[in-house]
Image (spheres, helix red, strand yellow):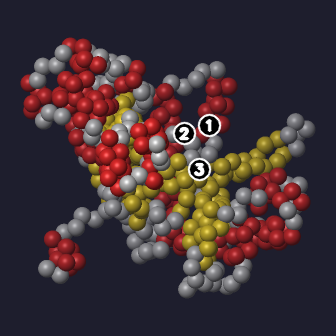
Amino acid sequence: MFGRGTWAIFGLGKESFDTFVKNLYDQPGMLAASQLAASAVTRATAIDTMGINPFSGPRLDDEHPVGAEHEAALAKFATMEPDERATHVLPEEIVQCEGYGATEAQFRLHATMPWYGLWAVWNEWKDVSDIASIREQRCYRMLDRPYKFLESTDKKTVDQDTTGITAVIRKQVPVFLDFNDGLIYIENTNKDLLYQVTVRLSLLGVEVIPVAWTFPGRPNWPAEILNRLHEKTQFQTEFQQRADDASRFTKNEIEKHENRELESIVSKFFSMTELSSGLWLGISTPAQIRLHDAGAPIGVKGSTTATTLLNVTNGANVLSGALTFQEVLSGTTKKGAEYSFRKDLFCVDVNDKINMTEIGAAMLRGFNLSSFRKDVMREIRHTKEVPTIDQFWANWLHEMSNALRAIEGTFRDILEIDGDQPAGIVPMPVPTKESMQEITGA
């Protein structure tokens, strides 16, 4: 987290707030939902599980483990039905263990805003040894020949007798719950893991709502946005000159612009457009270019290559690209001369994979708050105070939600979507009986 990554976004039912908070104080329920219990279940039963840790304790279960003599009891408790757990008596050593979160304070990120954070931990029971090498060793010692040279009956015997070392493999991801905007953010792209996180959140009382990036009447809106931006790009002459130079010289031989601001534009982007908001929006690679409507997409790694391809035919267009939002600031040198410079605010990839409709998630792919770390470090130097962990998380969520609103507003503006129309990240329509009959013909 706190760097470039991909976030899956789900809707969150604001009316589930009270139930969620109430469940955070349910000690038996939070113990059963915890990573402390989930890892015990995986070790005891060799099945995959999902558990949670508070945002401030990514390895809280490791810091405060239960004794080995209590693991079986904890695993049994975690697999009980809720009504069974209510009457079940656990050893006091488990109940009083500090390896799990069971209060609102351990998950809340802000005193006045309804923001919450946690780590979702996926525990997978896997063989962590190299079975092939173990098998080869047995063949050398017992049969004096490599495995490939064994008879089929001997191979079968060796296979049956060869066992590896299994262990719990954990994968954990940060999760934000924003009850103010009604959104859930999960930093991951694995469909199975995302589904398991939403199931765990539902068990905690959170209403998870499927959503998708939607712009009415614009089925190919990602490409439409990119091409509308490129049509209005400024610095066209400079982009073309840099592309021409790149075709004739090596990177080190290309003469840089004396204007640092201009150099920063042509060296990184192949399009730069000023928005009505006063921000600037640049398109960079990786990107996909199509030379004509019937042509196959061409993957592009270099911005100068993108410029060249887009000028090959009149019908060339952009299918995908990386967007960077910038603001132009001014400064003064020590000698009193004024100058301007560009500050990257945030970036996001735009392509046809921006929705994960199978699980109802809208994606922020390649997302980064470009200046977040620099801004925080500057504030630390100025105030001489380091933010607390909850402040780091809350600030990231605040800036990410601001960026999301800016992205939605910008896309609406570029596509000229009427202000009253639902657009951006909106709930996915729930299939009705009539619509299902139309699809199935029943």
- Crowding at mark 1 (Cα within 10 Å: few <14, some 14-19, many 20+): few
Tell me which numbered mark, 2 or 1, is placed earlier along the sequence.
2
Earlier in the chain: of badge 1 and badge 3, it is 3
The percent position of residue 276, horizontal first and vertical second, equals 60, 62
Residue at left 39%, top 60%? 356
Checking the image for residue 2, the label placed there is: 2
Give the number of callouts.
3
Q: Mark 1 points at which residue?
A: 373
> Could you tell me if the residues under marks 2 and 1 are in contact, i.e. CB atoms within 8 Å?
yes
Q: Are marks 1 and 3 in contact (CB under 8 Å)?
A: no
- The secondary structure type at the circle numbered 2 is loop
Foreground: 132 or 241? 132
The type of residue carrying mark 3 is Phe
- Quadrant in the picture for residue 33: top left
- Does the rendering let one see residue 134? no
Mark 3: secondary structure? strand
| Separation of residues labelled 2 and 1 (CA atoms) | 8 Å
Task: Check disc 1 and give the amino acid type.
Answer: Arg
